[in-house]
Image: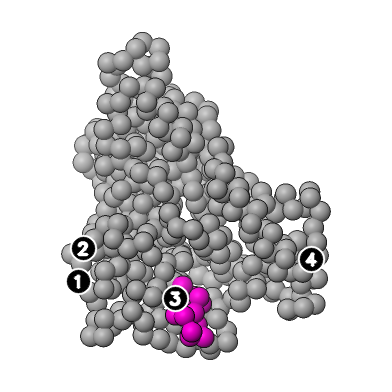
């Protein structure tokens, strides 16, 4: 990651500029480097009319839009044998420890950088996330390195059955804006299909996100408040007595420095784990396991969208409190209970990733393409008469309609707070 004035960003991060009265006000730019001598970021404007113009801008005029890191596929390091869990857990399909050896407490299971970094807790977060998903989809259709695999990894993540009203409203607004932009009409049924596609993509972010601390001083910069989605960690299931926790590599902040492993998330064994056990994390605060059963379930249902049926909750429901559930078979059985796929809590420690440039300069798609690329082909044809057809746009409709395989997100040793 590149260390700026107060924020850490990956090369290729897309930001939006605030420059009233300037021709690039509200435009997207791509982060290239930080000029510590001038205390400004060097960025490249994305809009075609700016001809990839480079600017030096202060951090205060930038706002995070999104960062796509397909390199996370190749940078992911597995230190333990993990097998896909064929059974649906209460928060999606996760992983089972493979091999024949018991993993001791503190052993590193894997290390991984984020796949997506997007805003959280901002008025524009859903629009920015939809734009990020479309950018990845269009890049995958063009065969850009790593993008098809990254898109599949994201589409394979599960989503919660309990959809937040804000997500549904945002999906409807995105579709309505696109229809108006295309100057076309759409039947109620066709519109609902498009809303569902957008809603599923937005829920995949919402259900699998982790808080991503990218500031020198946590929670100090609203313009860069972020969450991240991970390939492995976002699939781990919840348990109120977990066997796994996550930690984050975080280098000392120094403006202008580039730190390769800054923000890499590391998963470790919280206790000895036997072969065949499902890996689990706690999605809540660090003290959640000590809460009464009803309070734990209410918290997880409200924050993460699922009724917890982990081993501890099932045992306490059956036998009352003060039950201690520890290993393998019991934990695995509880994790196989089928409930609503949960919304991934946002662990306080989950953060950032490597400084390898991954968003290539070829992503110069017009905003019109971004707005309209999910629309049915007949709307694209109508809109094309006014603004020009969008090459390769139909791939997004295919990508967003892929089947949902279960997966879930996880938490850290400090627990999670939800965005």
Q: State the SS at label 2.
A: loop
Q: Residues within 10 Å of mark 4 (few under 14, many from 20)?
A: some
Q: State the SS at label 1.
A: loop
Q: Which residue is mark 3?
A: 18
Q: State the SS at label 3.
A: loop
Mark 1–mark 4 Cα distance, whole angstroms, equals: 51 Å
Residue 56 versus residue 377 in the image, above or below: below
Image location (x, y in percent) of residue 239: 37, 31
Q: Is residue 231 left or right of residue 5?
A: right
Image location (x, y in percent) of residue 319: 36, 10
Q: Residues within 10 Å of mark 1 (few under 14, many from 20)?
A: some
Q: Which mark is residue 184?
A: 4
Magenta region: 16-30
Q: State the SS at label 4.
A: loop
Q: Which mark is residue 251?
A: 2
Image location (x, y in percent) of residue 54: 43, 87
Asked if the residue at tag 2 contacts the one at tag 1, i.e. Cβ–Cβ closer than 8 Å, the answer is: yes
Instruction: Work out whether residue 382 can be spotted.
Output: yes
Residue 13 versus residue 194 in the image, above or below: below
């Amino acid at each position: 990651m590149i260390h700026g004035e107060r924020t850490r960003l990956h090369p290729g991060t897309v930001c939006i500029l605030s420059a009233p009265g300037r021709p690039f006000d509200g435009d997207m730019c791509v982060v290239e480097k930080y000029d510590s001598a001038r205390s400004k970021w060097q960025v490249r404007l994305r809009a075609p009319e700016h001809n990839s113009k480079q600017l030096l801008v202060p951090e205060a005029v930038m706002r995070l839009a999104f960062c796509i890191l397909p390199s996370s596929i190749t940078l992911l390091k597995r230190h333990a044998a993990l097998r896909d869990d064929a059974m649906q857990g209460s928060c999606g399909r996760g992983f089972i420890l493979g091999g024949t050896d018991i993993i001791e407490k503190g052993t590193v299971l894997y290390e991984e950088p984020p796949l997506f970094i997007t805003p959280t807790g901002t008025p524009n977060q859903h629009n920015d996330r939809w734009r990020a998903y479309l950018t990845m989809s269009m890049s995958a259709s063009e065969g850009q390195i790593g993008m098809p695999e990254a898109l599949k990894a994201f589409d394979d993540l599960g989503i919660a059955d309990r959809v937040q009203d804000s997500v549904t409203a945002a999906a409807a607004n995105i579709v309505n804006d696109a229809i108006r932009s295309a100057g076309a009409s759409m039947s109620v049924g066709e519109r609902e299909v498009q809303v569902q596609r957008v809603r599923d993509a937005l829920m995949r972010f919402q259900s699998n996100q982790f808080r991503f601390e990218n500031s020198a001083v946590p929670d100090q910069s609203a313009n860069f408040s972020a969450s991240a989605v991970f390939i492995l960690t976002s699939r781990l299931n919840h348990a109120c007595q977990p066997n796994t926790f996550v930690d984050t590599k975080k280098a000392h902040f120094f403006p202008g420095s580039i730190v390769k492993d800054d923000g890499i998330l590391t998963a470790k064994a919280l206790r000895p784990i036997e072969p065949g056990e499902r890996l689990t994390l706690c999605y809540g605060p660090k003290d959640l396991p000590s809460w009464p059963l009803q309070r734990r379930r209410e918290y997880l249902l409200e924050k993460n969208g699922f009724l917890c049926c982990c081993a501890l909750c099932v045992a306490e429901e059956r036998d009352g409190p003060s039950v201690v559930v520890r290993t393998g078979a019991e934990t695995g059985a509880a994790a196989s209970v089928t409930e609503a796929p949960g919304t991934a809590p946002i662990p306080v420690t989950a953060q950032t990733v490597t400084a390898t440039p991954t968003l290539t300069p070829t992503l110069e798609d017009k905003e019109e393409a971004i707005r309209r690329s999910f629309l049915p082909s007949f709307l694209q044809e109508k809109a094309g008469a006014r603004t020009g057809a969008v090459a390769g746009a139909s791939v997004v409709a295919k990508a967003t309609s892929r089947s949902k395989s279960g997966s879930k997100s996880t938490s850290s040793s400090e627990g999670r707070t939800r965005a």
